[in-house]
Image (tube, rainbow, N blue to C red):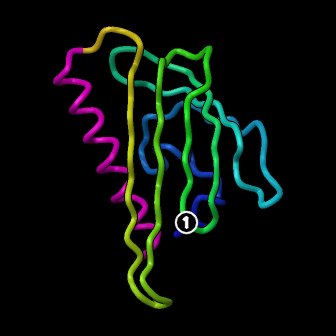
């Protein structure tokens, strides 16, 4: 699972959605994993741009946080991968916190968070099985 994030998808935050207008990888680590990327996406009520910084604990987890200066106040998230033994199924835990920093009705924010998380996990599973 962990190595799937090495292939730069449209975004490593929401890798399986079509919300993104552009993604720019600014910096890679020695393993060619993104360290910083800037994304522009259409979130229905407006277009937003933000930059994420990534941290890796290979092969256990990847985490990201929004840097200051973008259109979004806060996006923190992570994937954690747990496998009991070689050949056993891997459990993936996806965590996401979003504070857009602009007025969004609560029901819309909850709906967006749910849709983003479902799409990310569904897409990750499909890519792993496909």
Looking at the image, residue 65 sits to the left or right of residue 43; the answer is right
Stretch in magenta: 105-130
Residue 107: percent from left, percent from top: 16, 24
Image quarter in which the C terminus is found: bottom left
Residue 130 visible in rendering: no
Front one among 18 and 55: 55
In the displayed structure, 5 sits above or below 49; it is: below
Looking at the image, residue 17 sits to the left or right of residue 117; the answer is right
Give the crowd class for mark 1: few <14, some 14-19, many >=20 residues within 10 Å: some
Residue 97: percent from left, percent from top: 38, 34
Q: How many labels, in total?
A: 1
Q: Residue furthest right?
A: 30
> What residue sits right under mark 1 in the picture?
60
Residue at 83% x, 57% y: name it. 30
Give the quarter of the image for residue 58. Answer: bottom right
Dominant secondary structure of the residues highlighted in magenta in the image: helix
Residue 75: percent from left, percent from top: 47, 31
Looking at the image, residue 27 sits to the left or right of residue 23; the answer is right
């Amino acid at each position: 699972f962990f190595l799937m994030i090495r292939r730069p998808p449209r975004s490593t935050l929401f890798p399986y959605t079509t919300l993104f207008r552009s993604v720019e990888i600014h910096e890679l680590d020695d393993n060619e994993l993104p360290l910083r990327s800037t994304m522009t996406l259409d979130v229905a009520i407006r277009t937003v741009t933000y930059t994420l910084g990534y941290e890796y604990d290979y092969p256990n987890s990847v985490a990201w946080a929004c840097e200051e200066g973008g259109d979004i106040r806060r996006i923190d998230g992570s994937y954690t991968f747990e496998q009991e033994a070689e050949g056993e199924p891997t459990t993936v835990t996806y965590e996401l916190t979003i504070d857009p920093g602009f007025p969004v009705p609560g029901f819309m924010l909850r709906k967006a968070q749910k849709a983003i998380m479902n799409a990310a996990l569904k897409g990750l599973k499909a890519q792993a099985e496909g």
